[in-house]
Image (spheres, helix red, strand yellow):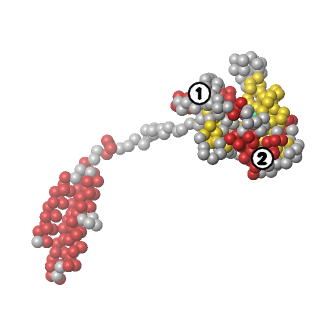
Amino acid sequence: MLKEKIAEIKTKSFAEIEKTASEQMLYDVKVKYLGRKGKLTEILKNLKNLDEKKRKTVGALANRIRMEIENAIAKHGREMSEKVDWEKEAIDVTLPGKKQELGHLNPITLVQRDIEKIFTSMGFEIADGPEVELERYNFDALNFPKDHPARDMQDTFWVKSKKESLVLRTHTSPVQIRYMEKHKPPLRIVAPGRVFRNEATDAKHEHTLHQFEALMVGDDISVGNFKYIAQQFFTIFFGKETQIRLRPSFFPFTEPSFEFDISCSICGGKGCRTCKQAGWIEIGGAGMVNQNVFAAAGYPKNKYQGFAWGFGLERLAMMKYKIDDIRWIESGDLRFIKQF
Ligand code: DAH
């Protein structure tokens, strides 16, 4: 019985070897008969159950067939490789490879990285806060009266909440409070991040924006420090001498408050289309931190003084990279993003 089975294994395996047309097929046949669970291997494994005489004869036969199958496989493998047309199969290693497309950084990310680099070189720390913010941090602690129009449904996205009232932060200023609650002066931080406003969008307005907040507090930080640092920053950022101009303004969280302009980076202040012939471009708001804000963060009143500002990243990116419509920035359009 066993001898016939072995003979059958031999004929079948030989026929299968002859038919194989690839290394893989040949390997599969090898596994089928000689592998760990192969047909011939099974027989060899079971030899130990036979009586001594049978074990000898069947064992010798099975081992011989094993050798024969191995030889047949090796021979067929050689024959296959002789048939290969190596000229045709050869790979031309001098051909150029397929280029892998790399991703591109959004201009906002590029501007944010510039800002972080310039400010850390001036000893500023980078701070962060949540995009879904407590109304308390976004408004109350920043000295917004309860009925201030900026809280209006018109420019704030409110978030339904069972506990404390939440908003999508409308500016990066709440980071000031979060940071001061945990740190004592002297301190200097920048806080870049995303902010949200319920805006009707057009070439100049978006609902999702980026700002960067700066805050520097100590015993005697003055408007002079602010002007110097701002001027340094813009000069390095645009790579050319930039003038700054402050105009009186109002923000609940600063006293005095300023509207902040820089000399137009396109015409250098002479007047052009970008600056509407004014020579100046409005960049954001700034001021000396209101003592009520220090108090909300847990500092004693009238002990410290410092400046703060909030500038729009989009405006800076649009000037630096000459982008004519703010909606490109969040568009996800590859034609736009591939330029950076
Ligand atoms: N948070 C203000 C806004 O989004 C900008 C701002 C103005 C920030 C004055 C400041 C500041 O830190 O001092 O309109």
SS state under label 2:
loop
Q: Residue 114 in the image: x percent, y percent?
A: 69, 38
Residue identified by numbered label 1:
327
Q: Residue 95 in the image: x percent, y percent?
A: 43, 38
Kind of residue sitting beneath label 2: Ala
Q: Residue 215 in the image: x percent, y percent?
A: 77, 41
Q: How crowded is mark 1: few (under 14 residues within 10 Å), some or many (20 or more)?
A: some
- Quadrant of the rendered image containing residue 166: top right
Q: On screen, 58 above or below 208?
A: below
Q: On screen, 119 above or below 330?
A: below
Quadrant of image for the C terminus: top right
Kind of residue sitting beneath label 1: Arg
Q: Residue at x 74, y 26 (%)?
A: 282
Quadrant of image for the N terminus: bottom left
SS state under label 1:
helix
Eye-nearest disc, 1 or 2: 2
In the image: residue 70, left or right of residue 89 = left
Q: In the depicted view, which residue is nearer to us: 131 or 155? A: 155
Q: Residue 64 in the image: x percent, y percent?
A: 19, 70
In the image: residue 81, left or right of residue 3 = right
- Mark identifier at residue 147: none
Q: Can residue 9 be seen in this view?
A: yes
Q: Residue at x 58, y 32 (%)?
A: 330
- Mark identifier at residue 297: 2
- Quadrant of the rendered image containing residue 66: bottom left
